[in-house]
Image (cartoon, grey):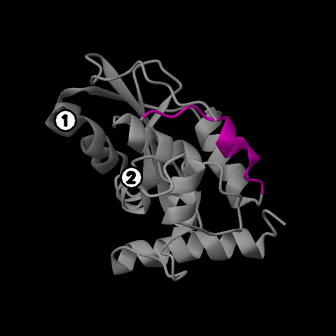
């Protein structure tokens, strides 16, 4: 459950990107330079994910493909096959305040196949009165799946977000439960 904090600026050399099929959709991963740290991950194109992290600078960078044996791609494939354990071993990095990073670390502790409320995540992070901060951190997460924000719900137990986002989150939860993850 590493969270690297030494890559604060966009690389001046290259991005490495790759995609794998997850639940019948394209799931992409973005890494900077030669680092193995995941900087962005989610459903959609690698270029849109890279833009979400590096802005317009991402359009100017050399883009190389991740190899088929890349550990992050392998972790997503294993998750798709019902084994989420490798996701926890992947180094990630997101820019954010210490409070946001604490919320992301706490969200990584929520077991597959289970749900936790934003308040639960805030309590795990050591800030029990910061449920709104947990919700904000989950909404700003750029390394989805590696930080399983799809498992985080409102206190009522309902998923939050835009309709398309809710559908993806529900599909991931359903996949985990169907595969017997976390039980």
Q: Residue 90 colored magenta? A: yes
Q: Residue at x 30, y 20 (%)?
A: 11
Which residue is drawn at the image coordinates 57% and 75% (left, top)?
171
Does 132 lie within the magenta span?
Answer: no
Residue contact at pointers 2 and 1, CB within 8 angstroms: no
Identify the secondary structure beneath mark 2.
Answer: helix
Above or below 160: residue 89: above
- Extreme-left residue of the structure: 56
Q: Please provide the residue range marked out in magenta.
A: 83-93
Q: Quadrant of the C terminus?
A: bottom right
Looking at the image, is 20 positioned above or below residue 23? Answer: above
Q: Position of residue 83 (x, y in %)?
A: 77, 54
In the rendered image, which residue does mark 1 sit on? 59
Q: Is residue 148 visible?
A: no
Q: Is residue 174 left or right of residue 104?
A: right
Residue sitting nearer the eye, 159 or 165: 159
The disc at residue 137 is 2
Image coords of residue 115 (percent x, y) = 63, 69
SS assignment at label 1: helix
What residue is rendered at 56% in x and 54% in y? 123
Q: Quadrant of the N terminus?
A: top right
Name the foreground residue: 134 vs 2: 134
Spatial CA span between label 2 and label 1: 26 Å
Residue at 34% of width from left, 34% of height from top? 95
Q: Earlier in the sequence, mark 2 or mark 1?
A: 1
Q: Position of residue 92 (x, y in %)?
A: 51, 34
Check the image and name the residue furthest to the front: 129
112 with respect to 161 (left or right): right
User: How far from the left and from the top, in percent, is residue 5?
Assistant: 44, 23
């Amino acid at each position: 459950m590493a969270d690297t904090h030494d890559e604060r600026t966009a690389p001046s050399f290259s991005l490495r990107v790759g995609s794998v099929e997850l639940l019948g959709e394209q799931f992409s991963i973005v890494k900077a330079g030669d680092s193995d740290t995941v900087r962005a991950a989610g459903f959609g194109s690698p270029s849109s994910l890279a833009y979400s992290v590096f802005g317009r600078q991402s359009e100017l960078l050399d883009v190389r493909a991740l190899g088929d044996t890349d550990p992050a791609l392998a972790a997503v494939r294993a998750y798709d096959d019902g084994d989420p354990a490798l996701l926890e071993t992947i180094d990630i990095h997101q820019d954010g305040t210490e409070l946001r990073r604490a919320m992301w670390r706490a969200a990584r502790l929520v077991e597959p196949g289970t749900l936790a409320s934003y308040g639960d995540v805030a309590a795990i992070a050591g800030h029990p009165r910061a449920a709104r901060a947990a919700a904000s951190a989950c909404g700003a997460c750029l390394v989805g799946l590696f930080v399983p924000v799809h498992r985080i719900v409102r206190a009522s137990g309902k998923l939050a977000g835009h309709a398309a986002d809710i559908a993806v989150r529900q599909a991931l939860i359903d996949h985990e439960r169907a595969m017997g993850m976390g039980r």
